[in-house]
Image: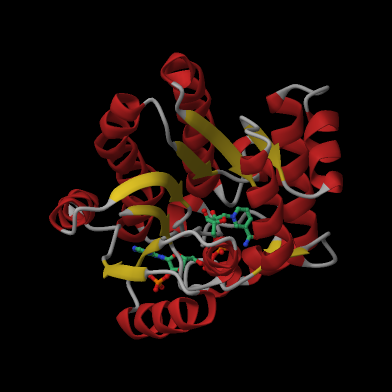
Amino acid sequence: MNVSLITGATSGIGESLARGLAERKHNLLLVARNEQKLQQLCRHLSGKNGIVAQYIAADLSQPGAAEQVFEESLKRRLVVNLLVNNAAIGSSGEFAKNDLHGDLKMLQLNNDSLVTLCRLFLPEMIGRRNGSIVNVGSLASFFPSPYMAVYAASKMFVRSFTQSLTEEYKPYGVHVMLFCPGLTTTNFMSTTANDNDWGKILVKGAYTQTSDQVALEMIQALDRKKTIHISGKRNALLVKMGSLFSYAMITKIFAERKRKQMGFAVSNQ
Ligand SMILES: NC(=O)c1ccc[n+]([C@@H]2O[C@H](COP(=O)([O-])OP(=O)(O)OC[C@H]3O[C@@H](n4cnc5c(N)ncnc54)[C@H](OP(=O)(O)O)[C@@H]3O)[C@@H](O)[C@H]2O)c1
């Protein structure tokens, strides 16, 4: 059976995408940690849309979890013709004060598992000369972000990696797209590592989309076989304007602005 695999499908953009693809009659393989939510969502989407929605509960911040997802898909004889690497977390604050273990787990989720899933599912797509991969980046894929340093670096990795794959696998008929949301109303900023004063100033008064708007843009970008899409016209314009300046200048402006908003002064504490 052909399926679309979405990681991080129990909330936010991933959940909206699951609903949107189900309406378009995609059979689904949903991955996230919360088994109860996965079960409820699959039951709801199958009943409502007459599709087969199934799930694998997995913590992709654990080494080996992405491989287990792949093995399980083989066991179930599923053909993944759309892979959406959407699951990711962020962390806000001063790098040297943040939880190192948490940041390393973030890299495992945002980068290692994404690379692993691409590596494991690509050969079959190449063999069939068909298939699509969407890797979810961020506006942070385009600019270093002081006080969100590790997350932004993880998303820059996603951009570089994905744009390379796009060109490598074009000759095989496999479509690889980098999809970059801007600020979106989801649970993303409420997770422990983001829910602090540094996180709050990022979202204050900022242009924000809903997860349904973002998911719809992703589906439309997939239909048009785009290789890169920044969701929200205002976000796309911001990236274009940002490209006119050096990384060093933008990074300095970001850092100074955030420090000012925080009333931040360097102390020996
Ligand atoms: N929201 C924004 O402002 C924003 C901006 C730019 C980019 N993005 C990107 O958009 C994507 C989706 O984020 P979102 O905003 O929709 O966030 P979200 O509402 O927090 O959803 C994150 C999803 O990932 C899953 N997840 C988290 N940790 C996981 C783990 N260790 N293993 C497996 N699944 C895990 C969560 O489910 P469980 O808790 O059930 O595991 C949830 O389904 C991410 O790549 C994010 O970087 C978001």
How many badges with numbers are in the image?
0
Choose top left, top right, bottom left or bottom right for residue 52. Answer: bottom left
Can you say whether 172 is above or below 162 in the image? above
Work out whether residue 202 or residue 54 is closer to the camera in this orientation and state it: 54
Which residue is painted at 55% across and 35% down in the image?
A: 177
From the viewer's perspective, tell me whether residue 69 is left or right of residue 253.
left
Colour setting: secondary structure
Can you say whether 89 is above or below 248 in the image? below
From the viewer's perspective, tell me whether residue 234 is left or right of residue 30.
right
Which residue is painted at 74% across and 62% down in the image?
A: 213
Q: Position of residue 92 (x, y in %)?
A: 55, 59
Q: Position of residue 119 (x, y in %)?
A: 28, 33
From the viewer's perspective, tell me whether residue 165 is left or right of residue 112.
right
Q: Position of residue 160 (x, y in %)?
A: 51, 26
Choose top left, top right, bottom left or bottom right for residue 55. Answer: bottom left
Which residue is painted at 44% across and 69% down in the image?
A: 51
Q: Is residue 264 visible?
A: no
Q: Position of residue 139 (x, y in %)?
A: 67, 44
Choose top left, top right, bottom left or bottom right for residue 236. Answer: top right
Q: Is residue 242 visible?
A: yes
Which residue is painted at 57% across and 51% down in the image?
A: 148
Work out whether residue 175 or residue 189 is closer to the camera in this orientation and state it: 175
Quarter of the figure with the N terminus: bottom left
